[in-house]
Image (cartoon, rainbow, N blue to C red):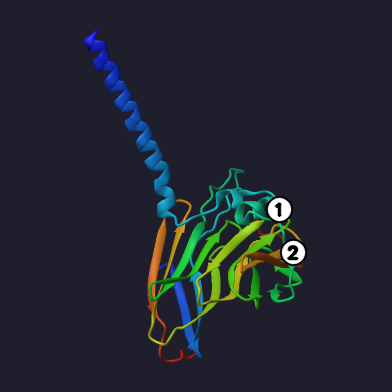
Amino acid sequence: MDQQRRILLKSTLAASATTMAISAGLLTPKAVLAAWNTAAFNAKDVDAALTSAYDSTALTDSNKIKLKAPDVAENGASVTITVDSKLDKTEAISILVKNNAQPLTATFKFGAKTEGFITTNIKMGKSSDVIAVVKANGKLYTTKQQVKVTIGGCGG
Amino acid sequence: MATSSTIQVRSSVKKGVATIKCLVSHPMETGMRKDKKGKLIPAKFIQNLSCEHAGNVVLDAELNGSVSTNPYIKFKFSGATKGDTIKVSWVDNKGDKDSVEVEIPTKRRRK
């Protein structure tokens, strides 16, 4: 009887220790990588990506955002995109490519002194709308431009 | 110019506004590309890239595999002066990382 009690106690302790180790293990990668919104980046369409990234798909068109992209991109592997937001309190800018397998390409979060400006190079699989989403003062604003791609840049 | 780092930074200050240009050497594989034998090339891309100035994070970028090979990022922030140190670092989905600290040059670079 006593022997069995011992075994039960031991196994229970071991099990709880394992659970703790697993939960600790699950938490570590998040602490190491600041944050990478897996659900948003793996989303297959624009709305799903926005819901995961910003908890909202309510976008307001704004002419205070300038999206500079080429009308025709010869090489889809490197398309230069510039987003310039003149909105007050711009907190973050996301770049989405509607027709890419995973539309959300990048999210840039800004510090208090950072201006609402970003230039980067992205890949485009085929001709698509490029959508800039700007989070300013807690609300989402957007503008978009169509880019025609001659040669796709996502392999395949 | 150090060549061992994967990160190249060009910076300048004009009227208190710093312009930072970063170029990172990285394959940025999406995980959707196939090699000649038709096998998928495993994903390897930078997920987080950040830039710090005077202990403040001025840019915190989350990137997907659809950012170009050898990512280029240009951004601006205010409150900087020449000679300030800025730190740029990245981490990719495989856990590889690199960082570099550079001073904003006091003299304009000759072209």
Q: Which mark is residue A47?
A: 1
x and y percentages locating residue B25 in the rendered image: 48, 65
Q: Are marks 1 and 2 on the same chain?
A: yes
Relative vertical location of residue A129 with respect to residue A102 in this rendering, above or below: below
Which mark's residue is nearer the viewer, 1 or 2?
1
Quarter of the image where one finds residue B37: top right
- Quadrant where the N terminus of chain B sits is bottom left
In the rendered view, would you say B50 is above or below A11? below
Q: Which mark is residue A149?
A: 2
Q: Position of residue A4 (x, y in %)?
A: 26, 11
**Is A41 situated left or right of B110 in this image?**
right
Q: Is residue A34 left or right of residue A95?
A: left
x and y percentages locating residue A20 in the rendered image: 36, 36
A91 over B109 or under it: above or below:
above
Residue A107: quarter of image: bottom right
Q: Position of residue A134 (x, y in %)?
A: 65, 67
* Element carrying mark 1: helix
Which three-letter amino acid code belongs to the residue tagged 1?
A: Asp
